[in-house]
Image (tube, grey):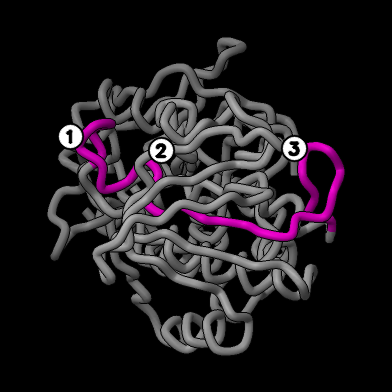
């Protein structure tokens, strides 16, 4: 990895070194193509670098990343980290990526795997993120879980934790009408892990409805209730405040029981949704393939979901829409074989 960038035209340029980019690079190399992968961050792996365990089997995210890297043959795949792409364009039948340092890299095909970013919870002021201490996001809780050390801002062991679902998703006020797919299952996963680390903690999960869309997902949800005693409350939180003793006060309505709910907790976790990353939004807009939310718009969701309106330009992963890690990897596989078909068809003509 991180060999010198090649200015010779490659078979494929991949923009984005997260799970989708790494998986697609490995598959394309297996098919005999030469790939140059560009990642703007210092390390490959994307959001796998921020996550500890994956749902539903609690597979170690670092192991997934290492396996993806292991499958990259160095004679066919070159990974370049710390390489920011400023502009993409097609000229003379080749796709060109212009980097921040002025290099122009070309390939017969290009795959965009620039992914997503977590919703900025500061935009939901009513929840008090960065206003009150001990209001954190699911990303920050995941880091605590990975370190095996869940603590309040004051360094205390929390006796109670509440989770709020759909922060930045299915929300007309912030303009995100879509479901982010992963928030419900993330809350179940994290509540189980929190209980394993803190056996005495009391936990409450506020939700609109729970979407356990996957094999073994419903079983984990039941486990969180029956074994770990997580209390799921259907209803939106309307307001948070800081109590006199410094805890987080929550006001909500239990819509199943039709009664108001008021409680105080030591830690409030906002289950943030997924938005198109800045790079995804930029390239989607510049190339004319942006959907209403800034994600990539494929040529046809049913029959050509990895192709775009431009010949030789392909998309994969959560840059298209919110996807789980397993679905991201499957989508990257599909993109790789579609690119292979495109390149082979060019060769035979």
Image position of 97 (left or right of 247)? left
Which of 317/14 is in front? 317
Q: Mark 3 or mark 1: which comes first in sequence?
A: 3
Residue at the spot 47% in from the left edge and 89% down from the top edge: 219
Image position of 168 (left or right of 263)? left
Tell me, yes or no, whether the two marked residues, 2 and 1, touch with CB atoms within 8 Å.
no
Identify whether 349 is placed above or below 114. Answer: below
Residue at the spot 75% in from the left edge and 37% down from the top edge: 3
Measure the alpha-carbon separation of dots 2 and 1.
29 Å
Residue 82 within the magenta-colored segment of the rendering: no
- Tag 2 secondary structure: strand
- Tag 3 secondary structure: loop
* Disc 3 target residue: 2
Q: In which quarter of the image is residue 184?
A: bottom left
Q: Give the range drawn in magenta.
A: 149-176
The mark lying in front, picked from 2 and 1, is: 2
Identify whether 156 is placed above or below 63. Answer: above
Residue 239 is tagged as: 2
Q: In which quarter of the image is residue 25?
A: bottom right
* Disc 1 target residue: 292
> Residue 194, percent across and down?
70, 66
Q: Mark 2 or mark 3: which comes first in sequence?
A: 3
- Tag 1 secondary structure: loop
Quadrant including the N terminus: top right
**Exactly how many numbered labels are in the figure?**
3
The mark lying in front, picked from 3 and 1, is: 1
Which of 285/255 is in front? 255
Identify whether 219 is placed above or below 231. Answer: below
């Amino acid at each position: 990895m991180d060999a010198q960038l090649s200015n010779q035209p490659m078979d494929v340029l991949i923009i984005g070194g997260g799970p989708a980019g790494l998986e697609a690079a490995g598959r394309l190399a297996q098919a005999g193509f030469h790939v140059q992968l560009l990642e703007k961050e210092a390390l490959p792996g994307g959001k796998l670098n921020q996550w500890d365990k994956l749902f539903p089997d609690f597979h170690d995210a670092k192991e997934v990343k290492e396996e993806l890297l292991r499958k990259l043959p160095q004679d066919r795949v070159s990974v370049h980290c710390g390489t920011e792409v400023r502009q993409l364009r097609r000229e003379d039948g080749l796709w060109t990526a212009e980097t921040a340092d002025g290099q122009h890299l070309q390939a017969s095909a290009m795959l965009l795997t620039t992914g997503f970013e977590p919703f900025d919870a500061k935009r939901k002021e009513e929840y008090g993120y960065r206003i009150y201490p001990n209001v954190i996001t699911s990303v920050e809780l995941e880091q605590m879980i990975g370190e095996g050390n869940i603590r309040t801002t004051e360094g205390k062991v929390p006796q109670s934790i509440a989770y709020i679902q759909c922060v930045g998703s299915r929300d007309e006020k912030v303009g995100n009408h879509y479901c982010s797919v992963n928030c419900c299952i993330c809350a179940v996963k994290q509540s189980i892990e929190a209980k394993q680390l803190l056996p005495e903690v009391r936990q409450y999960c506020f939700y609109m409805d729970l979407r356990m869309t996957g094999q073994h997902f419903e079983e984990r949800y039941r486990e969180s209730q029956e074994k770990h005693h997580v209390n799921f409350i259907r209803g939106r939180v309307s307001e948070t405040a800081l109590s006199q003793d410094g805890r987080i006060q929550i006001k909500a309505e239990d819509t199943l029981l039709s009664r108001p709910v008021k409680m105080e907790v030591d830690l409030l976790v906002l289950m943030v949704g997924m938005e198109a990353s800045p790079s995804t939004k930029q390239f989607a807009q510049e190339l004319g393939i942006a959907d209403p939310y800034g994600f990539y718009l494929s040529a046809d969701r049913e029959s050509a979901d990895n192709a775009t309106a431009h010949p030789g330009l392909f998309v994969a992963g959560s840059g298209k829409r919110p996807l789980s890690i397993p679905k991201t990897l499957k989508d990257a596989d599909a993109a790789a074989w579609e690119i292979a078909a495109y390149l082979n068809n060019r060769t035979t003509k």
